[in-house]
Amino acid sequence: MVKITTTYEGGLRCRATHGPSGTTLVTDAPVDNHGRGESFSPTDLVATALGACMMTIMGIAAERHAIDLKGMTVETTKEMTSAPPRRIASLRTTLTIPLPPDHPHRQLLEQAAHTCPVHKSIHPEIAAPIEFVWTGVS
């Protein structure tokens, strides 16, 4: 169990504190929803969590097989609905892996990304496709 304590600072800004580490982060409402857009919005954090989760789970699998994923990147594009109710419509994720496309553990690593707990927690009405781009040379 992890406790996150969040305080409303006013002006549509919140400060969250991660209980175990004391690390803080700030959220701000986006400009298109009455905010200043000066930090991650709460829904931006969902997109961030998705990408970070996939890379973390892939990293765990990679470490078990002594695979170096250093330099891997993820880009998650979040789109909101245009009609009410306001919610996330899609989270399209592209993982760029610095390994060759014919890497012997490719299937294991791609499957690991698909088992990310955040991805498994996304409502089925949210499109959440994953693309893998393998950039290494054989």
Image (cartoon, rainbow, N blue to C red):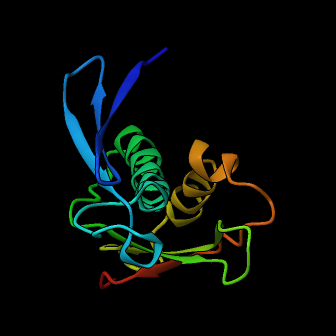
Question: Residue most toward the right?
Answer: 124
Relative to 70, 94 lies left or right: right
**Residue occupying image coordinates x 80% and y 65%:** 125
Viewer-proximal residue among 118 and 17:
17
Q: Name the residue at 30% across, 18% down.
A: 19
Q: Residue at x 21, y 35 (%)?
A: 24
Count of labels in the image: 0
Q: Is residue 66 left or right of residue 131?
A: left
Given residues 114 and 134, the one toward you in this image is: 114
Q: Quadrant of residue 99?
A: bottom left
Residue at the image point whose x is 67% and y is 78% from the top: 81
For the residue pair 21 and 93, the one nearer the viewer reads as 21
Placement of the C terminus among the 4 image quadrants: bottom left
Where residue 123 sits, quadrant-wise, is bottom right
Q: Position of residue 96 (x, y in %)?
A: 37, 76
- Residue 70 in the figure: left or right of residue 8: left
Q: State the image coordinates of residue 59 (x, y, percent, origin top left).
A: 37, 48
Residue 30 in sight from this viewpoint: yes
Q: Where residue 33 appears, x then y in whole percent?
A: 47, 71
Q: Position of residue 8 (x, y in %)?
A: 34, 37
Q: Taking the image as drawn, is residue 116 in sight?
A: no
Q: Residue 129 vs residue 54: left or right? A: right
